[in-house]
Amino acid sequence: MPKTLFEKIWDDHVVTAEPECPAVLYIDLHLIHEMTSPQAFEGLRRRGLKVRRPDRTAATIDHIIQTTPERFQPQKDPRVAALLHSIEENCRAAGIRLYGVGDEQQGVVHVIGPELGLTQPGMTIVCGDSHTATHGAFGALAFGIGTTEVEHVLATQCLLQRKPKTFEVRVTGRLPQGVTAKDIILAVCAKVGIGGANGHVAEYRGDTIRALSMEERMTVCNMSIEFGARAGMIAPDDTTFRYLAGRPFAPKDFERFRRLRTDDGAAFDASIDIDAGRLEPMITYGTNPGMGMAIGASIPGDAPKKALEYMGFEAGKPLLGHSIDVVFIGSCTNSRLGDLRQAASVLKGRKVKVRTLIVPGSGPIKRAAEAEGLDKVFVEAGAEWREAGCSMCIAMNGDELKEGEICVATSNRNFEGRQGKGGRTILASPLTAAASAVEGRVADVRTYL
């Protein structure tokens, strides 16, 4: 019987399943970070349990660490110091490789997994983080889990899961100039809504998706959770294999992964179509990623009143040209080398009019950008060039908005207070963010191309 990509990977990893009960699913790779792992390790200690597969576990420090040189000094904040000490000691005791502060490979968890070749087609991958679906770009089944589940995976290398349904997102056509992978996924979120794919795993298909680079595919899969999907996946192909070839933990033979595609005739439980040729640069106007629109459009008349009150926007009015206070280019959605190149293409020879933070996703990305001279472009434009980390995607590391400030951000969430108490977030692509930094207002990058 024809199977979808998801069904093939799910079936390959079910240890046991009983009717009406969750399946026991084997986990190939467990990624951990400093925020959701301390409680899990403490739970293991209380129960006298050890980490079952430290060789299938990898750790990094990304959420709470500063992206300024302060990170290399003794931590003044006792909470930060405690979290850093906790993950360092837990990893040392369990024999887990930690890409910590000072490590050349340190970076955002969903950036370094693929970068190191830890992320591979056909795997099941989990992490105590909402945007684990990023790894689905490689043809893996990857999803976020809670702290209790982190403990379960550490102890057993398995997880109880109910089988999700399937959701096809078919994107066809050629992307217009100035429209990027970020605009694709923001358009999907706007079309489906924040809960439209609840209980489903999304598979992105179509010639537009096939034409994307691996970095762009990761951007798309990263935000699958934002329209309710449990995970997002793209079938692996030669683009995938070329990206992985030669990376430290990547396999040498990729032929076995070619079966990882949806069979002809396989049925999805739900499906939507997106015409890429009709897309425009996208921005959000509200307090969840589903509240999105084309950059030249006006805010819908039926937009939630509470969201508009928080944002200070008005239904029926455009956002193009609206003044802003900050621009943030980074996060596990858009902090890779290609994203930085996009931003530099707009900023080169220009000056920013608002505070602009540009944060690479990892140490290797930072060094590669500097080797290309991108850091000089950013600094000469008046932007801040930082160390690798989550930074202003989430207000827990010193990078945050002041109350009332509006930020155009390349991150993945625009919830109330996400970037700081009272801060207001407009999600956008690196191109749109860079153009907005130059103008000090929401800008259409197509006027620069």
Image (tube, rainbow, N blue to C red):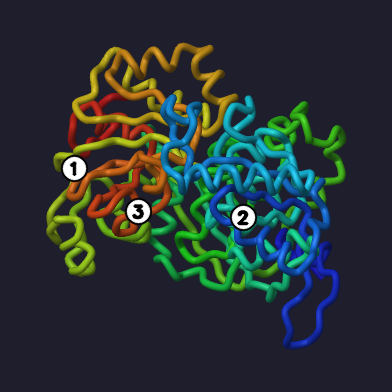
In percent of width and height, residue 283 lies at 30, 48
Q: Secondary structure at mark 1?
A: loop
Q: Indicate which disc residue 37 carries.
A: 2
Residue 174 visible in the current orientation: no
Which sits in the foreground, 148 or 210?
148
Q: Please name the residue shown 74% across and 53% down the image.
A: 261
Identify whether 316 is placed above or below 166. Answer: above
Side of 36 where 315 appears, left or right: left
Q: Secondary structure at mark 2?
A: loop
Front of the two marks 2 and 1: 2
The amino acid beneath tag 1 is: Leu
Residue 218 visible in the current orientation: yes
Q: Residues within 10 Å of mark 2 (few under 14, many from 20)?
A: many
Cα gap from disc 2 to disc 1, whole angstroms: 41 Å
Cα gap from disc 2 to disc 3, whole angstroms: 21 Å
Q: Secondary structure at mark 3?
A: loop
Name the residue tied to disc 3: 418
Identify whether 413 is placed above or below 344. Answer: below
Name the residue tied to disc 1: 320
Q: Please name the residue shown 80% across and 49% down the image.
A: 54
Q: From the image, which quarter does the C terminus lie in?
A: top left
